Amino acid sequence: MPTPLTQRITAVLWPSFLMAGLATVVFFAVFDPYDLVAPTWFPNLSRLGAYSIGFFLFWLLTASSCLLTCYFQRPVNRVNRLPGRDKE
């Protein structure tokens, strides 16, 4: 039986959300947002804005990693099915 779409989306977004939160805490414990934002086009960005952007960038990175993991764990016979062959 195939996995429901909602469960597959949750399997990607929930672990990536948790890891993005952890990565944000660790990253901003080492680096000050003001030092990172000063040489950019957004020198007036608040600390909260920098934390938010950092979190969403980490979430995007970890979500893409989780998505690739889900993609590569699919069975090979489903991916390499040739047209015209009987389904196994």
Image (spheres, rainbow, N blue to C red):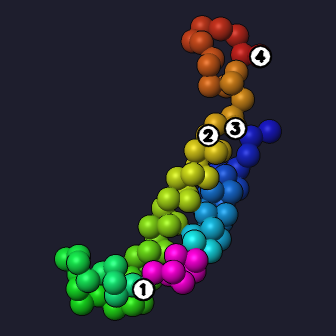
The amino acid pointed to by label 1 is Asp
Label whose residue precedes the other's in the sequence (1 or 3): 1
Q: Residues within 10 Å of mark 3 (few under 14, many from 20)?
A: few
28 vs 44, nearest the viewer? 28
Question: In this rendering, would 63 be left or right of 34?
Answer: right
Label whose residue precedes the other's in the sequence (2 or 1): 1
The percent position of residue 45, horizontal first and vertical second, equals 29, 87
Q: Is residue 6 shown to the viewer in this render?
A: no
Q: Nearer the viewer, mark 2 or mark 1?
A: 1
Q: Nearer the viewer, mark 1 or mark 3?
A: 1
Marks 1 and 3 close (CB-CB < 8 Å): no
Residue with the mark numbered 2: 71
Q: Residue 65 colored magenta?
A: no
Label whose residue precedes the other's in the sequence (2 or 4): 2
Q: Nearer the viewer, mark 4 or mark 3?
A: 3
Q: Is residue 1 shown to the viewer in this render?
A: yes
Q: Secondary structure at mark 4?
A: loop
The percent position of residue 87, horizontal first and vertical second, equals 72, 16
Whole-number angstrom distance, CA of label 2 to CA of label 4: 20 Å
The percent position of residue 74, horizontal first and vertical second, equals 69, 34
The amino acid pointed to by label 4 is Glu
Q: Residue furthest left?
A: 41
Residue with the mark numbered 1: 32
The mark found on residue 73 in the picture is: 3
